[in-house]
Image (spheres, grey):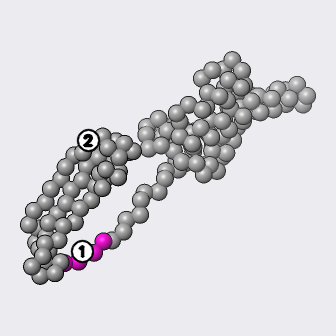
Amino acid sequence: MDTTSITALLKSTQRNWSNQVRQVLTTSIIHTINFIWFCRNQARFKDKPLTFHSALSKLKSTISMSGNTSTKYAYNNMHDFSLLRDLHIKINFKAGPRILEVIWKPSSPGRIKLNTDGASKGNPDHSGGGGIFRDQNGIVMACFACYNGLENALFAE
């Protein structure tokens, strides 16, 4: 992190971090600056200097309490996990996709039913598709899967 100025320090939080980590780092910088000012005033005007250990403990608890109110989401990686865990901040992950039950309906007698699907990891990214052929009793007659390379979701479908 660039510590040459407060502006540079705050700009360094704009890296490719998750929204939760970015918010925690920004509030940590603000809390740290505020706490240094508080400790200075305690020692100078009230003649009550705080020990380094005591000041650090209070700062960590303030950062933890502030970070635990975040509604932003963390990435699912070790960097976010270890940083937030070390600061005693609960990690907010995005909820997984909803799972819907799909009920297969048989085809009419004498017909074969084909169910297909395709997907892309990104847009574009690795993509593929597949399908299953079944008779009216639900017995699999044939199936296929294919890798489409780097394509978008519309191509995969």
Locate residue 99, reporting x and y percent: 37, 65
Q: Residue at x 39, y 45 (%)?
A: 123
Q: Which mark is residue 149?
A: 2
Instruction: State whether residue 54 appears in this view.
Output: no
**Residue in front for this viewpoint, 81 or 124:** 124
Where does the image place residue 124, in percent across and percent down from the top left?
37, 42
- Vertical placement of 45 versus 127: above or below? above
- Which quadrant of the view contains residue 49? top right
Q: Can you give x and y, in whole percent of width and height, for residue 56 in the image?
A: 68, 32
* Residue 104 highlighted magenta (yes or no): yes
Element marked by disc 2: strand
Quadrant assignment, res 2: top right
Which label belongs to residue 132? none
Residue closest to the eye, 116 or 83:
116
Q: Left or right: where does residue 17 sit relative to residue 61?
A: left
Q: Which residues are magenta?
A: 102-106
- The residue pinned by badge 1 equals 104
Q: Residue furthest right?
A: 45
49 in relation to 4, above or below: below
Please name the amino acid that badge 1 sits on: Trp
Total marks in image = 2
